[in-house]
Amino acid sequence: MVDKLNHDGSIIAVEHVNFFYGTFKALTDIHMLFKKNAVTALIGPSGCGKSTLLRLLNRMNDLIDGTRVEGRVYFEGLNMYDPNIDPVEIRKKIGMVFQKPNPFPKSIYNNIVYGPKLTGMNNKNDLNALVEKTLKQSVLWDEVKDILDQSALRLSGGQQQRLCIARALAMNPDVLLMDEPTSALDPISTAKIEELIDELKTDYTIIIVTHNMQQAARVSDETGFFYLGKLIEYNETKKIFTKPDLKQTEDYITGRFG
């Protein structure tokens, strides 16, 4: 019997979660609800637990020896840490885009179809349609449609990151996690990714870790401020950036610390 709970309007619910790397407590009593088809930004200084929480949301931390989770994380009402839940199935539904673009050393085409083929999609027409659809979604199609057989490693950094987004979308996820997806990119590529995030939230729920305050303010609907493994404040982005409830949040956002 899989543990199930109803959280109206939320696609992911984190309930009183503590997380440990060995004996080190990286997250303390985190409680958050993530709204469907919204962009949520996680902000805070380095080492405050933002990326740890992000990886917790699709069980990527399971791959690190000595980690331990207390509390519950619900995805579409199911406790994703229930022993009966397959973490691979979770990762199909909750995709991840990393800080540094990490295309496979394969062709652009094969980067997109690699995951779907592993799950049994083999029809050439279906694969071709999927490649076109996801590259259009990631606003990359017009730039690469004539070079799909060329190595993805020949693309620019910004193009590689959009390819990685397309690759994540090819698995048909409900949620897209982004860990500082523009920190390695130039301003023009960053602007393209931010525009893309705004377009994608129509169909996906997006959770983004960013060090860039202006980026959080531009792209997100909700913002959570973390400090030393604790969620200090979580609210609508406009409120967090204009009238936060706590002075600690205000001090961080205005650059007085962190």
Image (cartoon, helix red, strand yellow):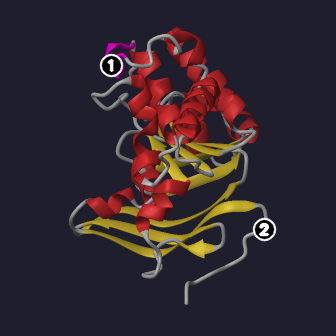
Q: Which mark is residue 8?
A: 2
Q: Is residue 110 above or below residue 193?
A: below
Q: Position of residue 71 (x, y in %)?
A: 48, 76
- Tell me the quarter of the image containing the C terminus: top left
The spot of residue 35 in percent (x, y) is 71, 54
Q: Would residue 193 be found to the left or right of residue 108 on screen?
A: right
Q: Nearer the viewer, mark 1 or mark 2?
A: 1
Helix, strand or loop at mark 1? loop
Query: Which of the pair 254/109 is nearer the observer?
Result: 109
Q: Is residue 249 visible?
A: yes
Residue drawn 53% across the image and 15% down it: 145
Q: Nearer the viewer, residue 197 or 113?
A: 113
Q: Element under label 2?
A: loop
Instruction: Identify residue type, mark 2.
Output: Asp
Q: Which residue is mark 1?
A: 151
How many numbered circles are shown? 2
Q: What span is in magenta?
A: 150-155
Label 2 Cα crowd, 10 Å radius (few <14 / some 14-19 / many 20+): few
* Relative image position of residue 229 (x, y in whole percent): 42, 56
Above or below, comparing residue 145 to residue 7 in the picture: above
The image quarter in which residue 59 lies? bottom left
- The residue type indicated by label 1 comes to Ser
Which residue of the protein is positioned furthest toward the bottom in this rendering? 1
Within the magenta stretch, is there residue 202? no
Q: Position of residue 194 (x, y in %)?
A: 61, 24
Q: Is residue 27 above or below residue 194?
A: below
Taking the spot 53% from the left edge, 37% from the top edge, the residue there is: 127
Q: Residue at x 70, y 30 (%)?
A: 198
Along the viewing direction, whichever of 154 and 176 lies nearer the viewer:
154
